[in-house]
Image: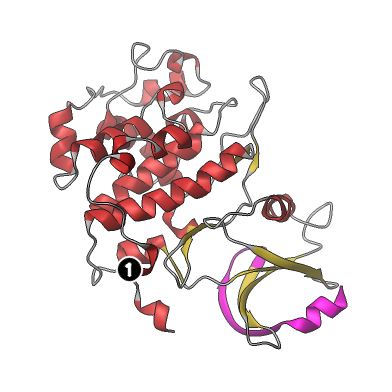
Amino acid sequence: MAASANKYKLIKKLGEGTYAVVYKATDAQNNTYAVKRIKLGEFKDGIDISAIRELKFLQEIRHVNVIALYDVYSDQETLNLVLEFLVSDLEHIIQDKSLIFQTADIKAWMLMSLRGLHHCHRSYIMHRDLKPSNLLIAADGNIKIADFGLARVAAYPQEYLTPTVVTRWYRAPELLLGSRHYTESVDIWAMGAIFAELMLRTPYIPGASDFDQVELTFRVLGTPTEEIWPGVSSLPLYDDLMTKITQRHPVPPPSEISLRFMAASTAALNLLNSMLEYDPSKRPTTESALLSPYFVEELPRPTKPQNLPKPPSFSS
């Protein structure tokens, strides 16, 4: 594998985490890549399980709206994933107040993200960490789902899973309440939170802690009951949390939701509300979301990727 290592020249550090550093790199033909260098020897088995998951799933998934893995090589200290180089992400676009969004732009970003997620779900893969910073953007404007370190194969109904997945602001309520059994619907909730953030230009439910996330979710969407979410009271953390949360909040009427998203159409609000259903079984699948009136019937049509608002990083 040393031959592969010699193919790439690292030219700029793009970011650094606890166990990996990402570099911009080029090859002899001056093609540009992102090389994710994952440190070895930090763990009992020599490599972080998230790196194994990311490598496995990216080798399996090929889709225009999922980041591409081009090559893999290792040396004595690192495992190196050679990935598609992407110039920005949705978080930077949301935060860049110099960029003006149109309804058709939001529709395009949601459409591409859901198409990529649909490909993952039909391949029986849950992403489990969808957020704007993991929705990367190519030079041609296409959204690419990235960072599969928390992804896993969809579970059997009685299989135990960890609830400590998904970045807090995008974490589904069943995870916040400690559920060990869940489905791809946790990804749908995260996409609903991203949808809301695109419309508001600020995170929809930005809890400061896990407890605050639960309390804020209940304040924004109402305190869940057995009537609207059968089985909620049997979730592991429900009783403990409900003793700490003294105030009960009603489910907001449609008129209140409309006031929060004043520029949103009825079709957009219907899709958003369905994605943020408390009861996971009532959330749409990626297929039914893509076939919703918001995408299929309502005008304007989604902006073409190449015509979407572009941040300054596109020219760097």
The colour scheme used to paint the residues is: secondary structure
Q: Please, what is the three-letter code of the amino acid marked with disc 1?
A: Asn
Q: Please name the residue shown 48% across and 47% down the image.
A: 115
| Rendered-image quadrant of the N terminus | bottom right
Residue that label 1 marks = 307
**On screen, 196 above or below 175?**
below
Q: Quadrant of residue 97?
A: bottom left
Q: Which residues are magenta?
A: 1-20
Q: How many marks?
A: 1
**Rendered location of residue 219, percent (x, y):** 26, 32
**On screen, 176 above or below 67?**
above
Q: 266 or 259: nearer the eye?
A: 266
Q: Was residue 124 drawn as part of the magenta stretch in this picture?
A: no
Q: 290 or 166: nearer the eye?
A: 290
Q: Was residue 16 drawn as part of the magenta stretch in this picture?
A: yes
Q: Is residue 287 left or right of residue 267?
A: right
Question: Is any atom of residue 207 visible in this view?
Answer: no
Density class for disc 1 (Cα within 10 Å; few <14, some 14-19, many ≥20) is few
Q: Please name the residue shown 36% across and 43% down the image.
A: 193
**On screen, 82 above or below 114?**
below
Question: Is any atom of residue 34 visible in this view?
Answer: yes
Q: Is residue 298 left or right of residue 263?
A: right
Q: Is residue 95 left or right of residue 261?
A: right
Q: Of helix, strand and loop, which one carries label 1?
A: helix
Q: 307 or 195: nearer the eye?
A: 307
**Rendered location of residue 181, percent (x, y):** 59, 25
**Rendered location of residue 98, percent (x, y):** 23, 72
| Rendered-image quadrant of the C terminus | bottom left
